[in-house]
Amino acid sequence: MKVATRITAATAVAVALAAGTYAFFDLRSRTGERRNTLEREARSVALVLRAAVEAQTTAFRMPTDVQLKALASATNGWELVVLPRTRASEIGDATSAPRFVRLRAVIETSRPIADVVGDRYIYALPIRVPAANDDDQLVGMIEISRDASALATTSDDLVRAIALVALIVIVTTIMVGALASRLVSRPITKLLSGIDDVAKGDLSHAILSERDDEIGAIATRFNEMTFSLRESRAETQRQNEAKHALEQRVGQSEKLATIGQLAAEIAHEVGTPLNVIAGRARSIQRKKDDLAAVEKGATIIADETARITRIIQRLLDFARRKVGTAEKSDVNLNELSLTTMELLSGQFSSARVKTRLDRAEALPRIPGDPDRLQQVLINLLLNAVQAMPDGGTLELETRVVERTRPGLEEATSTQQRFVTFAVSDSGIGIPPDIKDKIFDPFYTTKEGSGGTGLGLAVCSGIVKEHDGWIDIEDAEDGGTIFRVYLPAA
Ligand SMILES: Nc1ncnc2c1ncn2[C@@H]1O[C@H](COP(=O)(O)OP(=O)(O)O)[C@@H](O)[C@H]1O
Ligand SMILES: [Mg+2]
């Protein structure tokens, strides 16, 4: 039920009670007034009749019935009875007993009596006649009576009272209903629609702040709440943007670190063709008359230049790919392994490193960022090459394994599917005492030869971001195996 309806109903009930009570007492006081009027009339009629009766009463002789009838006919419908005092002793007559009781009371008190007996209104007065010793003597009672119906509440009165009560109730109900709807229902409805708007996410509305009552206070609090919600939403948005920008910057610097590694390698790789070009150019200078030698030298210079262009192109391709724009997608680590090995093929051959790529069949894809996962591969492969200064064997292997996460071995129920790739080299190996430092940023053992110490730090960051981890194992031939675990989709 609506609040306004409740208020209106409660008011209607209260008003009906109040008006009903008033009408009840009003009816009662009306009856009392009527009785007074009747009593006044009875007294004057009785006084007149008594005077007439007393005039006709000679000592101890009452007027006859005919005389009394004649007297009564002069009144407005009153019945007239005269009882002599001598008959006061007749109490005992069952039917007229009350009348004799009255006779005795009137004579004893010598006062009038007004009474309603059954459906008759009765007024009684003592009669006196002058006595010989000049004293008045009470000789009996005159009693007049008439129908008491004039005293009863008429149905007219009742109808009027009920109509009045109904009118008052209807008018107040309409007025209170209209007021309650204006002052309570409408503002609450507005408040509700404001709340609905907020629930739907629209925080732009202020509601009903113009009122200075409790509803206005609710609206004000509500507006304050909406305002602080708006503030905190904006704050969250600002924080998200800042976080996003920071992530971009971190990704950018990770990438720069990888490019740095790659560029150092490539600069080294470019050195060989440049030597060849320089040598050929000098020999052309010397043998400018030997056309065949000049032509051969020029061809070699063109080939080597093309090779340098390709090498530099590879670096540019990697560097130009934007950071942070790649959505997470399903990455095929087999494909990624192949393209990365190809990207670094020049480095492998100039470092006299033999490579082997061993890819698992039907390798599940993993959710991730292919560009960043390639950075991990590049860093691990370059580290492996650098660990084999005199050449050696490098192996890249992809696998699927079913296992628990490190530290959760006890809980066998948490078995999970992981895709792994492992880079193994036959290089110098990692001394046990530095194993827990190599992932620290700027930790390097290659100070003299352009190490940055960032490669593994970048790798571990990217792998953690993909919800995975990196294990290090010592290879049987003294080299190292870096194994990366990534959860399968
Ligand atoms: N495959 C590896 N074999 C031996 N040592 C390695 C290998 N990979 C990394 N390291 C050690 O970890 C250190 C940190 O590597 P990294 O973070 O890539 O920095 P950087 O290669 O610039 O030194 C290296 O300096 C090296 O001592
Ligand atoms: Mg490195």
Image: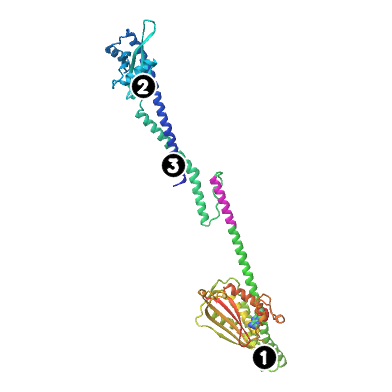
The magenta-colored residue range is 214-231
Does label 1 or label 3 sit earlier along the sequence?
A: 3
Res 297 label: 1
- Foreground: disc 1 or disc 3: 3
Task: Please provide percent x and percent y for residue 314.
Answer: 61, 80
Q: Amino acid at mark 3?
A: Ala
Q: Position of residue 61 (x, y in %)?
A: 30, 9
Residue at 40%, 23% (x, y): give it: 33
Q: Is residue 343 above or below residue 214?
A: below
Q: Who's the residue at 50% across and 47% down the image?
A: 188
Mark 1: amino acid: Gly
Query: Circle 2: is it few (<14), some (14-19), or many (20+) Cα within 10 Å?
Result: some
Residue position marked by numbered label 3 in the rendering: 9
Q: CA distance from mark 1 to mark 3?
A: 111 Å
Residue with the mark numbered 2: 115
- Judged left or right of residue 12, residue 483 is right
Q: Quadrant of residue 18?
A: top left
Answer with mark 2 or mark 1, whichever residue precedes in sequence. 2
Question: Badges 2 and 1: C-beta atoms under 8 Å apart?
Answer: no
Viewer-nearest of labels 2 and 1?
Answer: 2
